[in-house]
Image (tube, rainbow, N blue to C red):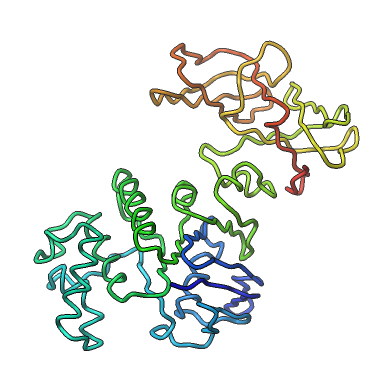
């Protein structure tokens, strides 16, 4: 297997720049995920790696080989799409081995590779069936098997789970993780779902407007986001953001007034000036009811999930705040209370979205 390196990649459609000078590297055997909102350029980036889109600038390397101008079939990649694109009149075995048939591979070689892929994907008992006899998850596994038999250097996945229901998506995420560990292949996966990104990736690349906003390990991005966009995009439910004004500073951080309340943030670097506008961010699991200080809110709705619940509240300024409760069974709807967080769990951002550390 081989790693993938992109250097100063650009893509324009006429005067519209879709990918803007992107450089990144996915080491050999790693599972990299491109994540971001619709229109951020993640699928375009994947299609350029596959050779399905030309670049407007930059260099693409696979296994140290420059493939920027190489045709798709010779890049050593296999792509799995959102649509299964299976031939309904062919059996599972014939669908999986179709590319080998086109390449005129010997029959014994083709059958051996199909059997091995079926074993890995737990499809051995379904090889003689037609796609119409399979579930959605099984059909997606056939599409993945079709990629496996080609023995590519890199697997590319373009939102392959989008057509599955919620339960199947969870199951297929687990199967993809097992598959990656089993065959040790380099994989690149595109999704708009940050839960998929967090659960699958070795490295996540968060895109916005054709730029990589931050790259790193899933928990690194969750615990230490570089900017407000990444902080709000990674995590479910999303981080709470409140506009505030700095009222006091000290060597450990600063205190700010927000939504009729007070929050304190720990900050190692330069402190914002007293009176400065600031944006504070707190994740739902770090907000807890407090006796004094904190933010005054009124509870509107609680999503009871069994072991935990997500409480949706509204501040006196009309802003929505979500906080998590674990193990509690008392109902809070309609109650007014104050919620706060420890200073080390309060993130600080400039009004322009830059992280203060």
The residue located at (13%, 73%) in the rendering is 90
137 is higher (above) or lower (below) than 93: above
In this rendered view, identify the residue nearer to me: 351 or 114.
Answer: 114
Q: Is residue 292 above or below residue 190?
A: above
* Nearer the observer, 285 or 277: 285
Q: Which image quadrant is residue 110 in?
A: bottom left
The percent position of residue 66, horizontal first and vertical second, equals 55, 84
Horizontal relation, residue 352 to residue 339: left or right:
right
Determine the residue located farthest toward the left in the rendered image.
128
Q: In this view, does 280 lie to the left or right of 74?
A: right
Q: Residue 59: which quarter of the image?
A: bottom right
Horizontally, is 22 left or right of 91 in the view?
Answer: right
At 61% from the left edge and 75% from the top edge, which residue is drawn?
Answer: 9
- The residue at 27%/73% (across/down) is 149
Residue 180 in percent (x, y) is at: 38, 59
Which of the image's four quarters has the N terminus? bottom left
Residue at coordinates 46% horizontally, 11% vertically from top-left?
330
- Give whichever of 333, 72 is nearer the camera: 72
Quadrant in which the C terminus appears: top right
């Amino acid at each position: 297997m081989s790693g993938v390196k992109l250097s100063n990649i650009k893509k324009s459609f006429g005067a519209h720049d879709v990918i803007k000078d992107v450089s990144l590297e996915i080491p050999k055997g790693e599972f990299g995920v491109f994540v971001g909102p619709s229109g951020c350029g993640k699928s375009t980036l994947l299609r350029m790696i596959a050779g399905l889109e030309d670049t407007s600038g930059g260099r693409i390397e696979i296994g140290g080989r420059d493939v920027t101008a190489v045709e798709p079939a010779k890049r050593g990649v296999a792509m799995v799409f959102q649509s299964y694109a299976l031939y309904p009149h062919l059996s599972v075995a014939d669908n999986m081995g179709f590319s080998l048939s086109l390449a005129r591979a010997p029959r014994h070689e083709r059958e051996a590779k199909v059997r091995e892929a079926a074993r890995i994907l737990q499809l051995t008992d379904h090889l003689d069936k037609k796609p119409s006899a399979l579930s959605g998850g099984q059909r997606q596994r056939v599409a993945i098997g079709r990629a496996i038999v080609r023995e590519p250097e890199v697997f590319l996945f373009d939102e392959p789970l989008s057509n599955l229901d919620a339960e199947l998506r969870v199951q297929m995420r687990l199967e993809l993780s097992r598959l990656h560990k089993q065959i040790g292949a380099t994989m690149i996966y595109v999704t708009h779902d940050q839960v998929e990104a967090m659960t699958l990736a070795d490295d996540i690349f968060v895109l916005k407007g054709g730029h990589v906003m931050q790259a790193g390990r899933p928990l690194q991005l969750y615990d230490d986001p570089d900017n407000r966009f990444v902080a709000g995009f990674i995590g479910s439910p999303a981080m709470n953001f409140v506009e505030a004004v700095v009222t006091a500073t000290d060597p450990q951080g600063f205190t700010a007034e927000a939504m009729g309340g007070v929050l304190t943030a720990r900050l190692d670097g330069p402190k914002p000036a007293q009176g400065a506008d600031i944006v504070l961010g707190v994740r739902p699991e770090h907000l807890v009811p407090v006796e004094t200080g904190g933010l005054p809110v009124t509870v509107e709705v609680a999503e009871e999930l069994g072991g935990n619940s997500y409480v949706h509240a509204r501040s006196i300024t009309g802003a929505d705040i979500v906080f998590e409760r674990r193990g509690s069974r008392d109902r809070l709807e309609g109650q007014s209370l104050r919620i706060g967080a420890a200073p080390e769990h309060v993130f600080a951002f400039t009004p322009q979205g830059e992280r203060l550390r």
